[in-house]
Amino acid sequence: PPPPPPPPPPPASRSPGAPARASLAVVGEGNFVLDADPEDLKWNPQTISVVLPCAEERDLAFKTVKSVWETTPANVLHEIVVVDDGSNPPLAQTHLTAEIQQKYKVLIKRHENTVGLIGAKKTGGDAATGDIVVFFDCHVGPQERWYEDFLNLIGENY
């Protein structure tokens, strides 16, 4: 049998007032050793970016943007990233004009030619800057308080 993994390094001591260091973990055969205090691992996300990959979904794109905006508190909704995946004419010229973009916190990323759902999601995810990135289809109406579980549960560390 292979030799056992080396023991985890001892926790580093920190002088008072020193910044927290990155947490480390050592994984061995069937075990996981954490060398950080669980309190140091807590994360309290505050904002959400919603990514909507859209291709030729004109009225539905606008309705989804409006629905996301109406069901998400302003302090939680960081932005709605709409990826226009080759719509012709572009959504920014038809249903998601500059006025709509400003009112509903919309950032448009455009593909001149359709690249497909996964490519559009990647473009949107790369552009999103909220604490949490959520992907919806471009033809949904989120339920009231849809965002609460994201904010409350994603920061838990099991």
Image: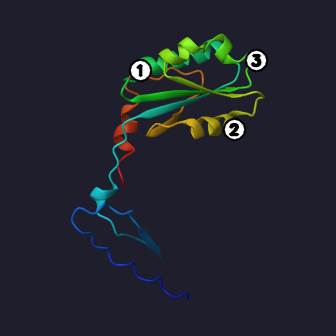
| Nearer the observer, 148 or 101 | 101
**Residue 66 picture location, percent across and down:** 50, 15
Residue 146 sits above or below residue 9 on the image? above
Q: Which residue, as the protein is rendered here, is positioned at the far left?
A: 16
User: Which element carries disc 1, helix, strand or loop?
Assistant: helix
Q: Nearer the viewer, mark 1 or mark 3?
A: 3
Give the class, few, some or many, for how many residues have Cα within 10 Å of label 2's Cα (few <14, many ≥20). Answer: some
Amino acid type at circle 2 is Gly
Q: Are the two marked residues, 1 and 3, in contact with CB atoms closer than 8 angstroms?
A: no
User: Which element carries disc 3, helix, strand or loop?
Assistant: loop
Give the class, few, some or many, for how many residues have Cα within 10 Å of label 3's Cα (few <14, many ≥20). Answer: few
| Nearer the observer, 131 or 2 | 131
Quarter of the image where the N terminus is located: bottom right
Residue 156 sits above or below residue 58 on the image? below
Left or right: 106 with respect to 71? right
Of labels 1 and 3, earlier in sequence is 1
Question: Is residue 126 visible in the rendered structure shown here?
Answer: yes
Q: Quadrant of residue 145?
A: top left
The residue indicated by pointer 2 is 119
Amino acid type at circle 3 is Asn
Q: Which mark is residue 101?
A: none
Quarter of the image where the C terminus is located: bottom left
Amino acid type at circle 1 is Thr
| Nearer the observer, 37 or 130 | 130
Q: Which mark is residue 71?
A: 1
The residue indicated by pointer 3 is 88
